[in-house]
Image (cartoon, grey):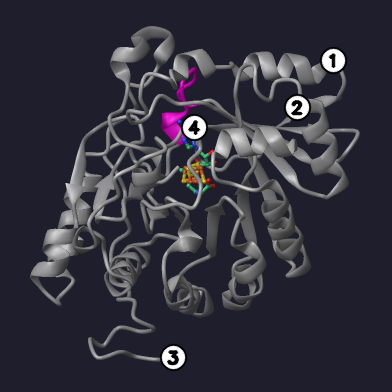
Amino acid sequence: MDTDATGREGGVSQNLPRLVDPFERTIDYLRVSVTDRCDFRCVYCMSEHMTFLPKKELLTLEELDRLCSTFVSLGVKKLRITGGEPLVRREIMTFFEAMGRHLQTGALKELTLTTNGSQLRRFAKPLADVGVRRVNVSLDTLDEKKFADVTRWGRLAQVLDGIDAAQEAGLGVKINAVALKGFNDDEIHKMVEWCGARSMDLTFIEVMPMGELGEEEDRLDQYLSLKQVRAQLEQRWTLTDIPYRSGGPARYVEVAETGRMIGFITPLTHNFCESCNRVRLTCTGTLFMCLGQEDAADLRAPLRASQDDAGVIEAVRKAIARKPKGHDFDYSRREIQGQMSRHMSHTGG
Ligand code: SAM
Ligand code: SF4
């Protein structure tokens, strides 16, 4: 096995105690936003004229590598790369290649990403080559005009071609669709059918009130409960609850007619915090311990302060020791006062 200049095998220190929070949850899943930029402007995610972060605020690819490798050395087994749109970050394959080496050593079990699919034609094969096995592609509608409306800048044909490329490269594809009232509620059967025919799982996500998008996009107006979505689906499909768990706020059913899974991510109406195994790192090196709370830890300062990882490791451990028991994000109770001021594209969805 390779040993680097710091004596770490494959760039990962060995035998460090794992990350366990005060509620005995082992933290082994890290979601990393590698950029706040995107080639789309989805109405529920960004305003059309977003101001992006200055470059010096962003972690460099080398810093991302160092930080993610530190998390792997602390027992993180799954890394999900997100954004913004991760595949628009320049030279992003350098970072994926760096993470691929942790797959090779076995320290990391899964390297995956969430993408809008626009760049998959170019990147699917290289991603598969470094060890990525599955991707989540966000796609809210199969209608070209509606797709252009919801993404503002996206083209459906390009994303469908990206999905083809991913499947040609042997990647498993799961589709993520944000459920939006009056927008895609009439398409849910079509999406289940389409995903089934293409051997893809499908997850519906409840829209969350994140960031400030301007008055024209009031997300409480867009809110469609997944209870309604499920009830609608049951009129046509045979759904069976299955115990599959990802540790996150999703519950899954199997569709008898297609043999595929449908997930329901309901962060607003349900708390599944007791099994939460994840933390989120923003593209500026801020660690959020809970999607629904503002408490965060700055990892960029200790990272930049020293080439030695001891300071970062200490900051990570202190942060995990503050991971809250549950989030405070139930809009059936808190309504709009609970709105998070940060954008999904910053924290990573
Ligand atoms: N650009 C990539 C993409 O769209 O898949 C990755 C980042 S995006 C922020 C990650 C996920 O967050 C996407 O599935 C997107 O639909 C979802 N998302 C963004 N804003 C949201 C919101 N306000 N409520 C619920 N989901 C949201
Ligand atoms: Fe971009 Fe993804 Fe946000 Fe859409 S949801 S604007 S694709 S980051």
Neighbor class of circle 2 (other Cα within 10 Å; few <14, some 14-19, many 20+) is: many
Where disc 2 sits, the SS reads: helix
Where disc 1 sits, the SS reads: loop
Please report whichever mark, 3 or 2, sits nearer to the chain's N-terminal start.
3
Q: Which residue is mark 4?
A: 43
Please report whichever mark, 3 or 4, sits nearer to the chain's N-terminal start.
3
Please report whichever mark, 4 or 2, sits nearer to the chain's N-terminal start.
4
Cα distance in 3D space between marks 4 and 2: 19 Å
Pair 2/1: label in front: 2
Q: Which residue is mark 3?
A: 1
Q: Amino acid at mark 4?
A: Val
Please report whichever mark, 1 or 4, sits nearer to the chain's N-terminal start.
4
The answer to whether residue 94 of the structure is visible from this angle is yes
Magenta segment, principal secondary structure? loop
Give the residue at x 59% y 40%: 245
Highlighted magenta segment, given as a residue range: 267-275
Where disc 3 sits, the SS reads: loop
Give the residue at x 45% y 42%: 349
Q: Amino acid at mark 3?
A: Met
